[in-house]
């Protein structure tokens, strides 16, 4: 490890405009996380993705120029900690139906956009960059989550819930966490007979008393009352949402705990 304090490594974006090069990156990512294979092998997740095309999309030279300019302009607005801790970020365009149109990351440093115009949203970019950061610094993030009251859950959940759990490429390796040793959030397909990637509810399973609730438990809601429902599916999502739009959470009781753990430079760009 070098001395990152005296020599901050600047973050930079590489927009992969060549479809074949992007597909190579996706294949390399697949060898690492096996996301598509896991989806394929699971009945509900396979069904939910049946109509989707998960491959790279081509980017025209004009679009590439336009989006490189956007990425160049966005860079100074990215929080300093991300700019110091991350190096190259590879950006690829996917077919519009890929993953229900939702941006996401793949290992080791790839951000996938089913709609490339999502690149112009600063909060979306920061959210995805925190997911890359979570991939790069797993031990640090376990510590952060534990300070926030979360622990990895290595026990089981009922098969009736597990069968309908929607996989998420950003949480695939450690999908289940327990909050205050009480609640395990699980993203569950709303329509189990016709699962859709973008139509999920979050269920909260209480493993010791063996029941679940379908609304956010008050203990969890109290820490970040203004977070959207999708933030509650996983501490990686919760922290990515909060750090991407800190102004929205400044009065949340959980905010200072998170900020103490990750530092002020995580929400400041200079
Ligand atoms: Zn996310």
Image: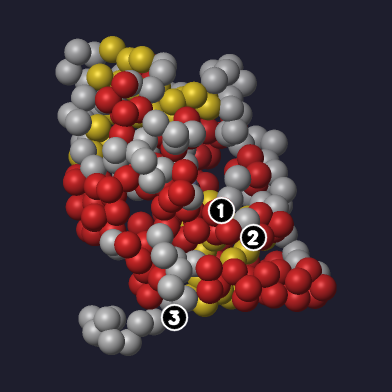
> For mark 2, does the 10 Å Cα neighbourhood hold few (<14), some (14 to 19), or many (20 or more) residues?
many
What is the spatial separation of the Cα atoms under label 3 and label 1, in whole angstroms?
20 Å
Please state if 160 lies on the left or on the right of 1 as rendered: right
Residue occupying the point 58% across, 75% down: 14
Give the answer, above or below, for where 108 lies relative to 180. Answer: below
In the rendered image, residue 33, in percent from the top left (x then y), is placed at: 42, 54
Number of numbered discs present? 3
Q: Check disc 2 and report the residue beneath it.
A: 119
In the rendered image, residue 96, in percent from the top left (x then y), is placed at: 72, 48
What is the spatial separation of the Cα atoms under label 2 and label 1, in whole angstroms?
7 Å
Render colour scheme: secondary structure
Q: Check disc 3 and report the residue beneath it.
A: 10
Which residue, as the protein is rendered here, is positioned at the far front? 251
Q: Looking at the image, tell me whether mark 2 or mark 1 is earlier in sequence order.
A: 2
Kindly tell me whether residue 15 is visible in this rendering: no
Q: Check disc 1 and report the residue beneath it.
A: 124
Q: Which quarter of the picture shows residue 38?
A: top left
Please state if 176 lies on the left or on the right of 207 as rendered: right
What is the spatial separation of the Cα atoms under label 3 and label 2, in whole angstroms?
19 Å
- Quadrant containing the C terminus in the rendered view: bottom left
Q: Looking at the image, tell me whether mark 3 or mark 1 is earlier in sequence order.
A: 3
> For mark 1, does the 10 Å Cα neighbourhood hold few (<14), some (14 to 19), or many (20 or more) residues?
some
Q: Cβ–Cβ below 8 Å for labels 2 and 1?
A: yes
> For mark 3, does the 10 Å Cα neighbourhood hold few (<14), some (14 to 19), or many (20 or more) residues?
some
Q: Secondary structure at mark 2?
A: helix
Q: Cβ–Cβ below 8 Å for labels 3 and 2?
A: no
Q: Secondary structure at mark 3?
A: loop
């Amino acid at each position: 490890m070098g001395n990152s304090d005296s020599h901050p490594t600047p973050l930079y974006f590489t927009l992969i405009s060549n479809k074949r090069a992007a597909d190579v990156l996706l294949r390399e990512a697949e060898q690492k996380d096996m996301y598509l294979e896991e989806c394929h092998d699971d009945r509900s997740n396979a069904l939910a993705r049946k109509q989707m095309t998960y491959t790279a999309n081509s980017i025209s030279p004009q679009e590439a120029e336009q989006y490189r300019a956007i990425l160049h302009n966005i860079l100074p607005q990215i929080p300093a900690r991300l700019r110091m801790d991350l190096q190259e970020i590879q950006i690829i365009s996917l077919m519009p139906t890929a993953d229900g149109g939702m941006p996401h990351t793949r290992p080791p440093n790839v951000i996938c956009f089913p709609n490339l115009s999502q690149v112009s949203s600063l909060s979306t970019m920061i959210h995805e960059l925190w997911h890359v950061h979570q991939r790069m610094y797993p031990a640090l993030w376990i510590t952060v989550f534990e300070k926030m009251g979360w622990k990895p859950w290595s026990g089981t959940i009922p098969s009736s819930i597990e069968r309908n759990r929607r996989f998420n490429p950003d949480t695939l390796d450690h999908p289940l966490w327990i909050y205050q040793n009480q609640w395990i959030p699980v993203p569950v397909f709303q329509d189990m007979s016709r699962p859709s990637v973008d139509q999920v509810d979050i269920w909260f399973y209480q493993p010791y008393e063996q029941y679940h609730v379908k609304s956010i438990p008050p203990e969890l809601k109290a820490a970040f009352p203004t977070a959207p429902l999708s933030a509650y599916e996983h501490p990686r999502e919760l922290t990515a949402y909060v750090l991407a739009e800190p102004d929205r959470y400044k009065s949340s009781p959980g905010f200072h705990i998170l900020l103490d753990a990750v530092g002020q430079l995580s929400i400041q760009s200079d």
